[in-house]
């Protein structure tokens, strides 16, 4: 069973308020940096810059723990979002709980909402 599914998101499809994993590769030095952050907007007047809040560095050389960071959309930056597994699991648990409550109220263990 896969618990965490990440999908790549194109630069122009970033959604405000969504948390992303940002992978930045420095190919000349063969180094990767991985961050997490919440997308706030595209930088005004510069179409290839994204702005993020609550940025934390997960993997890299320098530790960053900043409120705001801007990323230039270069060929070596990739954005990933967590596929909606959390919402699907939560919804399934809520339906199961509703069914259990209704079964007890009705008194029929085969009842399904």
Image (spheres, helix red, strand yellow):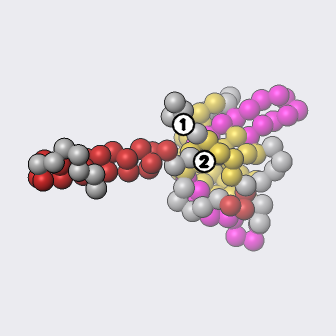
Seen from the viewer's position, the closer of residues 50 and 103 is: 103
N-terminal label among 1 and 2: 1
**Which is nearer the eye, 54 or 11?**
11
Residue at figure coordinates x 54%, y 55% from the top left: 18
Residue 95 shows in this picture:
yes
- Judge left or right: residue 112 versus residue 70: left
Up/down of 48 relative to 93, above or below: below
Residue at image location 28% in from the left, 51% down from the top? 112
Left or right: residue 109 versus residue 71 is left
**Could you tell me which residue is drawn at 83 percent across and 48 percent down?**
75
Left or right relative to 76: residue 92: left
Residue 95 percent coordinates (x, y) = 31, 51
The crowd level at tag 2 (other Cα within 10 Å; few <14, some 14-19, many 20+) is: some
Q: Where residue 42 sits: x, y (%)? A: 67, 64
Q: Which residues are magenta?
A: 24-46
Q: Is residue 37 visible?
A: no
Query: Number of callouts in the render?
Result: 2
Q: Is residue 78 left or right of residue 94?
A: right
Between label 1 and label 2, give the one nearer the viewer. 1
Q: Is residue 30 magenta?
A: yes
Helix, strand or loop under label 1: loop
Predominant secondary structure, magenta span: strand
Q: Which residue is mark 2?
A: 81
Give me the disc on residue 4. 1
Residue 51 falls in which quadrant of the image? bottom right
Name the quadrant of the C terminus: bottom left
């Amino acid at each position: 069973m896969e618990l965490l599914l990440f999908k790549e998101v194109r630069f122009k499809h970033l959604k405000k308020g969504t948390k992303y994993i940002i992978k930045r590769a420095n190919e000349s030095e063969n180094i990767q940096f991985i961050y997490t952050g919440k997308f706030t907007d595209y930088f005004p007047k510069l179409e290839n810059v994204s702005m993020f809040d609550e940025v934390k560095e997960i993997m890299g050389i320098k530790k960053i723990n900043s409120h705001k960071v801007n990323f230039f959309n270069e060929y070596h930056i990739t954005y990933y979002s967590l596929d909606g597994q959390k919402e699907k699991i939560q919804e399934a648990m809520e339906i199961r709980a509703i069914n259990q409550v209704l079964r007890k109220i009705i008194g029929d263990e085969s009842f399904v909402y």
